[in-house]
Image: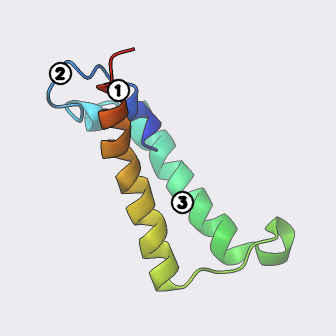
Amino acid sequence: VFNEINSREMEKINVLEGVLENYVFVGVISCTVIFQIIIVEYLGTFASTTPLTLFQWIVCILFGFLGMPVGAAIKLIHV
């Protein structure tokens, strides 16, 4: 989800500007999130998964959000 945000130019201060205006991006991200939930919560044996608790879902989402500032900080390192 956050690769689109991390791939934007860091020279621009607001890397989130215009992200939700791209309907294809919003559609792909929405479908990805929905299918991830379906796979993890409902496909059990078929997908070799077990349902997550609410705490586990929150931790997964927090890790995803942490990827955004970490990616932004790494892109600021001059190579």
Inspect the image, locate mark 2, and give the three-letter code of the amino acid beneath it: Lys
Disc on res. 34:
3
- Residue name at image x 14 percent, y 27 percent: 13
Along the polypeptide, which appears first: circle 3 or circle 1? 3
Q: Secondary structure at mark 2?
A: loop
Q: CA distance from mark 1 to mark 2?
A: 12 Å
* Quadrant of the drawing holding the C terminus: top left
Q: Which residue is mark 2?
A: 12
Disc on res. 75:
1
Along the polypeptide, which appears first: circle 2 or circle 3? 2
Inspect the image, locate mark 3, and give the three-letter code of the amino acid beneath it: Ile
- Residue name at image x 60 percent, y 60 percent: 36
Contact flag, marks 2 and 3 (Cβ < 8 Å)? no
**Going by the image, does 11 lie left or right of 19?**
left
Tell me if residue 65 comes above or below residue 73 in the rendering.
Answer: below
Number of residues whose C-alpha sits closer than 10 Å to that of mark 2, classed few (under 14), some (14–19) or many (20 or more): few
**Going by the image, does 38 lie left or right of 16?**
right
**Going by the image, does 74 lie left or right of 60?**
left
- Residue name at image x 38 percent, y 64 percent: 62
> Residue 52's quadrant in the figure?
bottom right
Q: CA distance from mark 3 to mark 1?
A: 29 Å
